[in-house]
Amino acid sequence: MKNSIITYNKNGKRRFILTSMFGIGSEDDLISQFETYKNRIPNTCIPIGRDAGGNLVCLNLSKDKYGNVYFWDHEEELMYEDGKITLNDLYIIAETFHEFVNSLEEENTQESESDGYKVKKVWVDPDFLIELENNSDQ
């Protein structure tokens, strides 16, 4: 699953590269990730993975839309007060975890969709930056 391409809709087709899935007893542990993001994502969700830019893949655990998989864009988080983001503010990737796993595509490093684009501005999530710094020693 690592470095797989995922597609979702946000004013048209958008893609991202899934760089990690969170596990149990691993460095990217589900519980530690939940604790890190619990006031930043909807309280019905648990983060289950991350993309190359520090955005999250979240699994909804509420009765309404149970099992739906969403994309959480950390840059859009700045538009909301702490604890005010809802499921409607995330982007649905799949209606079930099974559908999510089946939607994974292998990354083709030969193709570059970013050719001709230039970076105008970069914002790095502070919690993601701490994780990067902590993992750079390994």
Image: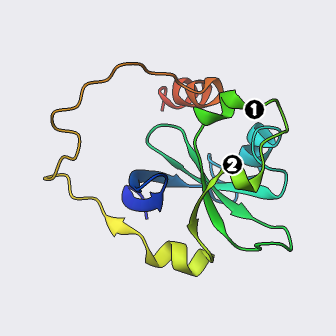
Across and down, in percent, residue 15 comes to 39, 54
Across and down, in percent, residue 23 comes to 64, 59
Q: Residue at x 48, y 59 (%)?
A: 9
Q: Secondary structure at mark 2?
A: helix
Q: Are marks 2 and 1 in contact (CB under 8 Å)?
A: yes
| In the image, residue 130 above or below residue 74 | above
Other-residue count near label 1 (Cα within 10 Å), few / some / many at <14 / 14–19 / ≥20: few
| In the image, residue 8 above or below residue 83 | below
57 on left or right of 46: left
Q: Residue at x 41, y 56 (%)?
A: 12
Across and down, in percent, residue 10 comes to 49, 52
Q: Label for residue 89?
A: 2
Alpha carbon separation for disc pair 2 and 1: 10 Å
In-front residue for pair 7/25 = 7
The answer to which image quadrant residue 24 occupies is: bottom right
Other-residue count near label 2 (Cα within 10 Å), few / some / many at <14 / 14–19 / ≥20: some
* Amino acid at dot 2: Asp
Across and down, in percent, residue 34 comes to 77, 48
Mark 2 / mark 1, whichever is N-terminal: 1
In the picture, which quadrant includes the N terminus? bottom left
83 on left or right of 124: right
Q: Residue at x 23, y 40 (%)?
A: 114
How many badges with numbers are in the image?
2
80 on left or right of 19: right
Q: Residue at x 52, y 32 (%)?
A: 135
Residue marked by disc 1: 80
